[in-house]
């Protein structure tokens, strides 16, 4: 039933009855009556009576629906052309039109049959049957088209009816079809836009970036396709309009018929409708697209907010974990470094947070729809940034105070130790005289002045000044040092009292006099006048002279002395460990920041050609040195913090491992030459910039040479603190080992500079000594003049003493590109140690000695720069010769 209703309601269109229209049994030519009534013509059509009723009704209904309502309300004029037909055809036509014409009728013109008989029959028939036709309008029977012209102007009639109106049925059908198609297109397009608009309005905005991007892309694609459809529809309408107006365009004299003018108006109206629809759609799409873009902006903002917030929360959590304020200067300095590192680590997230907050505020300024969601997040970001900055400042303030406190405590402690050393170092025997006592008093007074320089005159200032940041542990330490200060001050006070008594006392020489027989003493006389042992210190004297340290302070002083020595050892080991850690970090930075970067494909183009494939020359065995110190040596010396006596064993145990420095130092000249050639390349500048090093690579490549010489200095300091104590022998052995390694390294660097020696120096045994000397030669086979000259003019020679050979070389120094001079040693002569003899003293100069060859056939008089150097060489040569004799036995 619904389908039938829809079929009845839907108006007919040309395409529905295209076949019936093409039969042309009825036409709407476009002509009008004098009052504007539309004219429908029924041309001569042989099978008119055979046309099915439905077809006839459809065609007539369609034709009457085309003129405007205004024109149709005037009434239609029907012209029935039956000039070649019979009366029966006229009758049938009138009957059908009367029974089925759907519109208002104004007039019916019938062009009667032209043949005489048929015309007569028609005249009679019309009179007889007029009422049967049931028409309420006049039926005018016409004999010819001339009669018709009396009613209708010729310009409104087609050529078939003697008029001038241009009409082509096929073109008319084509125009009607095109107009109706265009109307359908306009309607469909409007419906599509409306449907799309409804879908957009009902779409829920996604909650994540990806879905929002997909939705925006999908809607934009759909919008693009609909815009293309609109453009096609507008183009279709414009083309159709051009076709309808084509006769007028072609000829200025042509005019469009009223129906054609109505067609033009219809198409223009449809185009206007399209334009309005497009504008409304564009306006809606602009708002919707803006909302989608804002939604995407919001989702990006929310996503970035979550990421930044998580990073900031972790940062704040890490910062909150930095509650320690340190218990020593070293610890506080490390904490400050950690705080600095955290601050640097937080710089990027803070900048991102500030940037994101700024971006959020820009969204708000651009009238974003989600202001209520964005603004609180911006406030939150800025709050966290401010909190982190403020907390960082507080941490720095607290750690700064803590550092100041511990530095003052350390100064106070060092002052105490220095004071104890001063008291302990004052020899008792020297203080027995008035002059000695006064000198000791002056020393004490000078030292006590330094208390004021270090602001230690009021020890309790420490506690009072820093009470707000002190932990229970640091309070206890501060109180202990304050007590120590008071104890030391008390010791000074008592020492001053004793010394003042001695200074005031008039001492006289005591002569041994035999006692009178009658006066035998009842108790032994104190042996005050007995001289004390030379060099006896207060520490020793306290046991003999309690007047200097009453009330049991002897033990306290001895304990403090022992404690100070132990603490000093601790300072030395701490310095060793701290500098070792820094050294390992520097080695790591060289390997990762320079050596590894030479294999970085992104930086290969910056490496100069002279440096290609020469990484091992530039860096030597630096990776081997780094591995040893990082994995082995650093860990071992860190274990010595609690047990300083183990330090010497570390060096003795790793004696062979430390020989790796010899290889590094031997390569150093080659490395330096390569650096001079390539050091100013962009590659090294870029690596230095990334590492943020203030010095260039060559300064860091010198670190291993500097480090290997540093150990012996620290061992010497340890020995000073460990004289005559357990572990001293091991420390002395460790020091000797390190000095031997340094000598070996130094000798090897000279050895590699030997030139002109045809043999292999590695076959000469161990290099024992090397150095520069004045040398005179005396050859028995030589010319007398040569001998005389040789005796008076010494040669400058650099000697290399090996286990098997003694080499004589001439030292040459060359400048290299404005850098420091590079030494080389040109080989001149050699002596096998198995065939030489030695004369230890030469008459007239205690710095000379002789080395002779083949029973003094060749004699070399060698002059050292000092007697000590001469004796060292003689001792070493004697060892070699003695060793050879023992080997022969």
Image (cartoon, helix red, strand yellow):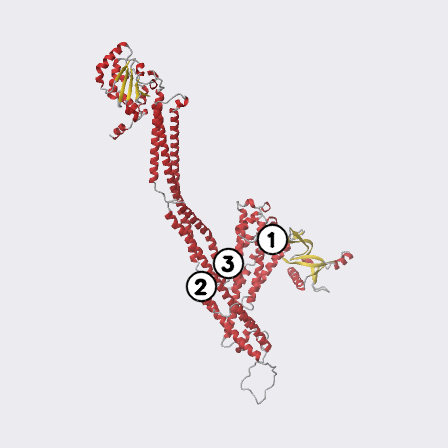
On the question of residue 592 being in view, the answer is: no
Observer-side mark, 2 or 1, equals 2
Q: Which mark is residue 635?
A: 3
Tell me which corner region of the image, top left, top right, bottom left or bottom right, holds residue 325: bottom left
Q: Residues within 10 Å of mark 3 (few under 14, many from 20)?
A: few
Residue under label 2, please give it. Answer: 469
Residue under label 1, please give it. Answer: 668
Residue 447 screen position, x and y as percent: 55, 71
Looking at the image, residue 82 lies above or below residue 827: above
Q: Is 92 placed left or right of 779 in the picture? A: left
Relative to the observer, which residue lies in front, 290 or 253? 253
Disc nearer the start of the sequence (3/1): 3
Q: Which mark is residue 866?
A: none
Q: Are marks 3 and 2 in contact (CB under 8 Å)?
A: no
On the question of residue 437 being in view, the answer is: yes
Q: Could you tell me which secondary element the residue under label 3 belongs to?
A: helix
In the picture as drawn, the residue positioned furthest to the top comes out as: 116
Residue 461 screen position, x and y as percent: 48, 68
In the picture as drawn, the residue positioned furthest to the right comes out as: 784
Q: CA distance from mark 2 to mark 1?
A: 51 Å
Q: Is 762 placed left or right of 106 in the picture? A: right
Observer-side mark, 3 or 1, equals 1
Relative to the observer, which residue lies in front, 219 or 291? 291
Q: Could you tell me which secondary element the residue under label 1 belongs to?
A: helix
Q: CA distance from mark 3 to mark 2?
A: 34 Å
Looking at the image, residue 50 lies above or below residue 508: above
Relative to the observer, which residue lies in front, 13 or 557? 13
Q: Are marks 3 and 1 in contact (CB under 8 Å)?
A: no
Question: Which quarter of the rendered picture does the C terminus lie within?
Answer: bottom right
Residue 705 screen position, x and y as percent: 58, 56
Q: Residues within 10 Å of mark 2 (few under 14, many from 20)?
A: some
Disc nearer the start of the sequence (2/1): 2
């Amino acid at each position: 039933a619904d389908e039938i209703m829809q079929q009845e309601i839907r108006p007919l269109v040309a395409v529905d009855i295209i076949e019936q229209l093409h039969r042309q049994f009825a036409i709407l030519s476009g002509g009008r009556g004098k009052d504007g009534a539309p004219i429908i013509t029924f041309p001569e059509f042989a099978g008119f009576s055979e046309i099915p009723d439905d077809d006839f009704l459809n065609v007539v209904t369609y034709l009457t629906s085309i003129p405007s309502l205004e024109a149709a309300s005037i009434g239609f004029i029907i012209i029935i052309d039956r000039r070649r037909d019979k009366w029966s055809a006229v009758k049938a036509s009138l009957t059908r039109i009367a029974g089925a014409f759907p519109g208002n009728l104004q007039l019916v013109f019938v062009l009667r049959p032209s043949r005489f008989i048929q015309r007569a029959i028609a005249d009679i028939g019309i009179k007889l049957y007029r009422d049967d036709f049931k028409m309420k309008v006049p039926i005018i029977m016409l004999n010819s088209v001339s009669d018709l012209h009396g009613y209708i102007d010729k310009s409104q009639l087609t050529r078939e009816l003697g008029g001038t109106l241009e009409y082509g049925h096929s073109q008319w059908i084509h125009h009607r079809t095109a107009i109706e198609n265009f109307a359908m297109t306009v309607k469909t397009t409007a419906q599509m836009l409306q449907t799309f608009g409804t879908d957009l309005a009902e779409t829920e905005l996604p909650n994540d970036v990806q879905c929002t991007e997909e939705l925006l892309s999908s809607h934009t694609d759909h919008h693009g396709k609909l815009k293309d459809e609109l453009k096609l529809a507008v183009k279709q309408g414009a083309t159709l309009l051009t076709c309808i107006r084509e006769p007028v365009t072609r000829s200025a004299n042509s005019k469009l018929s009223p129906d054609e003018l109505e067609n033009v108006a219809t198409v223009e109206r449809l185009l206007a409708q399209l334009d309005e629809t497009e504008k409304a759609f564009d306006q809606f799409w602009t708002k919707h697209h803006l909302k989608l873009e804002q939604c995407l902006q919001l989702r990006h903002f929310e996503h970035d907010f979550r990421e930044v917030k998580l990073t900031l929360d972790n940062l704040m959590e890490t910062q909150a974990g930095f509650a320690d304020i340190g218990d020593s200067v070293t610890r506080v300095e490390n904490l400050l470094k950690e705080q600095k590192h955290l601050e640097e680590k937080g710089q990027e997230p803070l900048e991102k947070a500030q940037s994101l907050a700024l971006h959020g505020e820009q969204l708000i300024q651009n009238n974003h729809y989600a202001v209520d969601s964005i603004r609180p997040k911006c406030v939150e970001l800025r709050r966290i940034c401010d909190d982190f900055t403020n907390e960082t400042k507080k941490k720095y303030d607290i750690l700064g105070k803590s550092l100041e406190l511990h530095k003052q405590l350390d100064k106070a402690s060092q002052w105490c130790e220095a004071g104890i050393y001063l008291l302990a170092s004052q020899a008792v025997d020297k203080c027995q005289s008035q002059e000695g006592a006064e000198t000791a008093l002056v020393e004490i007074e000078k030292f006590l002045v330094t208390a004021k320089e270090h602001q230690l005159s009021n020890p309790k200032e420490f506690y009072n000044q820093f009470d707000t940041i002190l932990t229970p542990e640091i309070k206890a330490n501060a109180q202990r040092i304050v007590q120590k200060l008071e104890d030391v001050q008390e010791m000074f006070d008592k020492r001053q009292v004793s010394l003042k008594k001695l200074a005031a006392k008039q001492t006289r020489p005591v002569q041994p006099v035999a006692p009178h027989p009658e006066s035998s003493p009842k108790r032994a006389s104190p042996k005050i006048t007995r001289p004390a042992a030379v060099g006896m210190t207060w520490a020793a004297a306290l046991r003999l002279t309690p007047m200097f340290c009453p009330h049991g302070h002897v033990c306290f002083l001895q304990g403090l002395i022992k404690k100070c020595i132990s603490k000093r050892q601790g300072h030395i080991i701490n310095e060793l460990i701290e500098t070792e850690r820094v050294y390992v970090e520097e080695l790591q930075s060289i390997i990762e920041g320079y050596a590894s970067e030479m294999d970085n494909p992104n930086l290969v183009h910056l490496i100069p050609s002279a440096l290609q494939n020469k990484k091992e020359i530039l860096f030597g065995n630096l990776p081997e040195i780094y591995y040893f110190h990082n994995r082995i040596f650093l860990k071992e010396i860190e274990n010595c913090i609690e047990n300083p006596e183990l330090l010497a064993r570390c060096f003795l145990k790793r004696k062979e491992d430390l020989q790796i420095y010899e290889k590094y130092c031997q390569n150093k000249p080659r490395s330096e030459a390569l650096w001079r050639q390539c050091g100013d390349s962009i590659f090294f500048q870029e690596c230095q910039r990334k590492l943020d090093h203030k010095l260039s690579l060559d300064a860091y490549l010198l670190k291993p040479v500097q480090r290997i010489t540093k150990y012996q200095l620290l061992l010497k300091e340890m020995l000073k603190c460990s004289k005559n104590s357990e572990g001293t022998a091991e420390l002395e052995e460790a020091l000797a080992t390190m000095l031997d390694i340094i000598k070996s390294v130094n000798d090897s660097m000279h050895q590699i500079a030997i030139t002109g020696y045809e043999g292999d120096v590695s076959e000469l045994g161990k290099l024992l000594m090397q150095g520069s000397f004045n040398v005179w030669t005396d050859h028995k086979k030589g010319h007398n003049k040569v001998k005389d000259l040789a005796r008076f003019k010494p040669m400058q020679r650099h000697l290399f003493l090996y286990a098997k050979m003694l080499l004589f070389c001439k030292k040459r120094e060359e400048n290299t590109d404005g850098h420091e001079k590079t030494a080389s040693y040109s080989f001149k002569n050699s002596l096998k140690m198995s065939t030489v003899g030695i004369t230890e003293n030469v008459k007239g100069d205690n710095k000379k000695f002789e080395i002779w060859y083949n029973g003094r056939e060749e004699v070399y008089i060698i002059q050292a720069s000092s007697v000590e150097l001469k004796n060292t060489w003689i001792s070493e040569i004697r060892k070699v010769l003695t060793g050879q004799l023992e080997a022969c036995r």
